[in-house]
Amino acid sequence: MIIIIAGPSGAGKTSLCNLLLEGLDNLVYSVSATTRKKRSNEINGRNYRFLSEEEFNKWRKEGKFLETAKVHDYYYGTIRDEVLKSLRNNKDVIVDIDVQGTKSVKEKMDNVVSIFVLPPNLEEALRRIKERGVDDDKSVKNRISNAEEEIKEIHSFDYVVVNDDLNECARIIQSIIIAERHSIVRMEV
């Protein structure tokens, strides 16, 4: 199945995905492509595939993406072949995407579980964004403004989890994944 982890900036999605990958077997991470600049702590091909806008548009025209979205002034896309290959190999795929991307994936694919991760409040999200130290003031304001809009879409998700404690939040999401793996819909009974 595809497990979508979505939520506003500062919700802790990346940290949660890392914990989920450590804590669950048979789970792989879908590395998204993006046109945003690489941060100093990121590795191309591990955190994201960093593409120029020209390369991104070429990939989009070639149908290489399962979904694409423009978020925070940059393009992001889920690489179709990597997701499909993992699914064919009986792996669950965790995808960290935005609200727009979630809608697109749910329209195109079966066997999708969507989880919206909320920060405890917008002040905490703001603190987390600033703590990363990679966004200028304009970008931070843009991310918080987008967060307010993204939260309005919460009812289109299967689950919502508040990340006020990273380890507890990861434990809850692990429980969701384990339960979904045992759903009669997914079991070959």
Image (cartoon, rainbow, N blue to C red):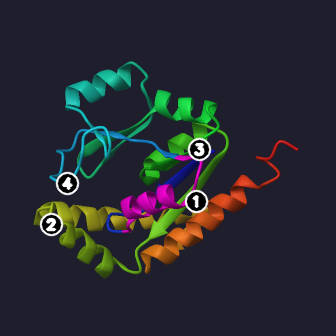
**Which residue sits furthest top?**
62
Q: From the viewer's perspective, is the residue at label 4 or at label 2 nearer?
A: 4
Mark 4 element type? loop
Q: Nearer the viewer, mark 1 or mark 4?
A: 4
Residue pointed to by mark 3: 106
Q: CA distance from mark 1 to mark 2?
A: 30 Å
Residue tagged 2? 133
What residue span does the magenta drawing correspond to? Answer: 11-27
Q: Is residue 151 left or right of residue 178?
A: left
Q: Is residue 19 magenta?
A: yes
Residue to which mark 1 is pinned: 157
Work out how far the residue at label 1 is from the one at label 4, CA to CA, in angstroms.
Answer: 31 Å
Q: Is residue 81 above or below residue 14?
A: above
Local SS, label 2: loop
Considering only vertical position in the picture, is 152 above or below 189?
Answer: below
Dot 1 alpha-carbon crowd within 10 angstroms: few under 14, some 14 to 19, many 20 or more:
some
Q: Residue at horizontal 24%, vertical 69%?
A: 129
Residue occupied by mark 4: 41
The mark that comes first in sequence, 1 or 3, is: 3
Left or right placement of residue 36 versus residue 97 in this view: left
Seen at 36% across and 26% down, the residue is 60
- What residue type is disc 1 on? Phe
Residue 178 percent across, percent down from the top left: 67, 60
The C terminus, quarter of image: top right
Labels 4 and 2: the sequence-earlier one = 4
Q: Front-most of 167 and 139?
A: 167
User: Alpha-carbon distance for marks 4 and 3?
Assistant: 31 Å
